[in-house]
Amino acid sequence: NFMLTQPHSVSESPGKTATISCTRSSGSIASNSVQWYQQRPGSAPTTVIYEDDQRPSGVPDRFSGSIDSSSNSASLTISGLKTEDEAEYYCQSYDSSNHWVFGGGTKLTVL
Amino acid sequence: QVKLQESGPGLVNSSETLSLTCTVSGGSINSYYWSWIRQSAGKGVEWIGRMSSRGTTNQNPALESRVTMSVDTSKNQFSLKLSSVTAADAAMYYCVGKGLLTGFVYWGQGILVTVSS
């Protein structure tokens, strides 16, 4: 099976752009869709990106997702950072048996 | 808007069976794959398994021998049973639905399960 590796933490200033990476250890990142979940303290995760780059209704267009086959990674980019974006972010994909695989999570600090 | 609500005992005795139910509202249970996911400080986010409304299942190999999932389409509910629990099974448990056509993932609010020795 493969692993998804995320940076433990990312910090950026309000109004700036933050990018969180999610690197797949083996197999192609493009083989299976990638989802991104936001989890604020004390709350359940919510989906901010699904199917690599699809943004649910209600999620600001400041959030975007992408796939880079050259680095075998997915990225979540949040532009125009707001303090309310401060949260833990998890990437998730599937293996060949449709088992879910999660990254370890990235704590985004906006300060 | 699909809403998921977990229910069940928040306290389970060690070696006994944990039983949780997820009630789905605002959508048909037949339109999704249903998963259970848990989160603990020690193990991060862990996928337990998934089930379709037709009964097809996939399970985390690490938990497969202890996991039973079922769907009751008449009640719009799906359930999890985890046998022989230990302290390592203490976690927040979430039910999650993934749209068959859209791929969008809905999360329940979660239920905290504690294991008593």
Image: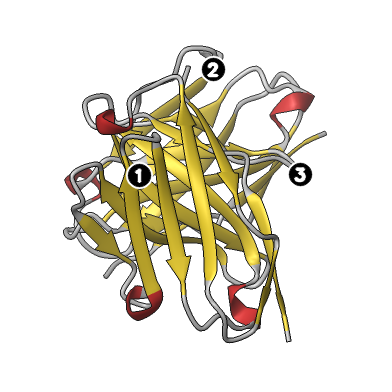
Quadrant position of residue B29: top left
Q: Is residue B46 above or below residue B31?
A: below
Q: Mark 2 lies on which chain?
A: A
* Quarter containing the C terminus of chain B: bottom right
* Residue A58 visible (yes or no): yes
Answer whether labels 1 and 3 touch (C-beta < 8 Å): no
**Image position, residue B73 (x, y; %):** 31, 37
Question: Looking at numbered disc 2 in the image, what kind of residue is underneath it?
Answer: Val
User: In this orientation, does residue A71 appear?
Assistant: no
Q: Which dot, 1 or 3, sits closer to the camera?
A: 1
Contact between marks 1 and 2 (CB within 8 A): the answer is: no
Q: Quadrant of residue A109?
A: top right
Q: Up-down: is B27 above or below A4?
A: above
Q: Which residue lies furthest to the front in this view?
A: B74
Q: Is residue B15 left or right of residue B68?
A: right
The lab-note entry on whether marks 2 and 3 share a chain reads yes
Badge 2 or badge 3: first in the primary sequence: 3
Q: Mark 3 points at which residue?
A: A42
Residue A93: x percent and y percent? 33, 49
Q: Position of residue B68 (x, y in %)?
A: 35, 66
Q: Nearer the viewer, mark 2 or mark 3?
A: 3
Residue A59 circle label: 2
Mark 1 burial class by Cα count in 10 Å: few <14, some 14-19, many 20+:
many
Q: Contact, CB < 8 Å: mark 2 with mark 3?
A: no
Q: Which of B39 and A85 is in front in this view?
A: B39
In the rendered structure, which amino acid carries the disc numbered 3? Gly
Left or right: B78 with respect to A33?
Answer: right
Q: Is mark 1 on a helix, strand or loop?
A: strand
The amino acid marked with disc number 1 is Trp
Which residue corresponds to the image point at 33% horizontal and 74% vertical from the top-left?
Answer: B64
